[in-house]
Image (cartoon, helix red, strand yellow):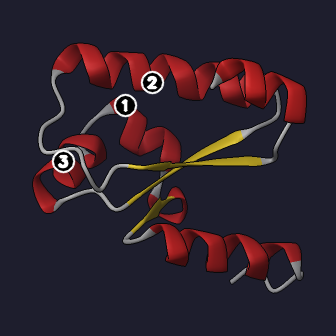
Amino acid sequence: MRQRIHQRRPRVVVLDGSAVIDLEYSALKALVEAERRLRRDGTELWMAGLNPEVLQVVRRSELGSRLGPGRLHLTVERAVERFLQHEAGDGS
């Protein structure tokens, strides 16, 4: 995934977490580090489809404070809609 991101240089990467049933500390730490690297390279990490328990873990963590509510989405489709709105200059 890193290689493709490096090649394509997207503005946003949406991570679909709909299949994630639990998020342990080491995985959360890896996501924080991945977000840090992506941000350094000019790419935003967005997350979508997290189940309620995983979403609460993310929100209470450093990752949640970095992402904020604008980069946590109920579904991938909603994340794409948000991105397209932002690109169109709506920004809402």
Task: Say which quadrant the C terminus sits in.
Answer: bottom right
- Front tag of 2 and 1: 2
Q: Position of residue 23 (x, y in %)?
A: 18, 33
Q: Label 2 vs label 1: CA separation?
A: 7 Å
Residue topped by disc 1: 62
Q: Quadrant of residue 39?
A: top right
Amino acid type, callout 3: Val
Q: Secondary structure at mark 1?
A: helix
Residue count near mark 1 (Cα–Cα under 10 Å), binned few <14, some 14–19, many ≥20: some
Task: Say which quadrant the N terminus sits in.
Answer: top right
Q: Are marks 2 and 1 in contact (CB under 8 Å)?
A: yes
Residue topped by disc 3: 54
Q: Label 2 vs label 3: CA separation?
A: 14 Å
Q: Quadrant of residue 2?
A: top right
Residue topped by disc 2: 32
- Front tag of 3 and 1: 3
Q: Is residue 41 above or below residue 43?
A: above
Q: Position of residue 11 (x, y in %)?
A: 81, 47
Amino acid type, callout 2: Val
Q: Residue at x 71, y 49 (%)?
A: 12
Of pointers 2 and 3, the one earlier in the residue sequence: 2
Of pointers 3 and 1, the one earlier in the residue sequence: 3
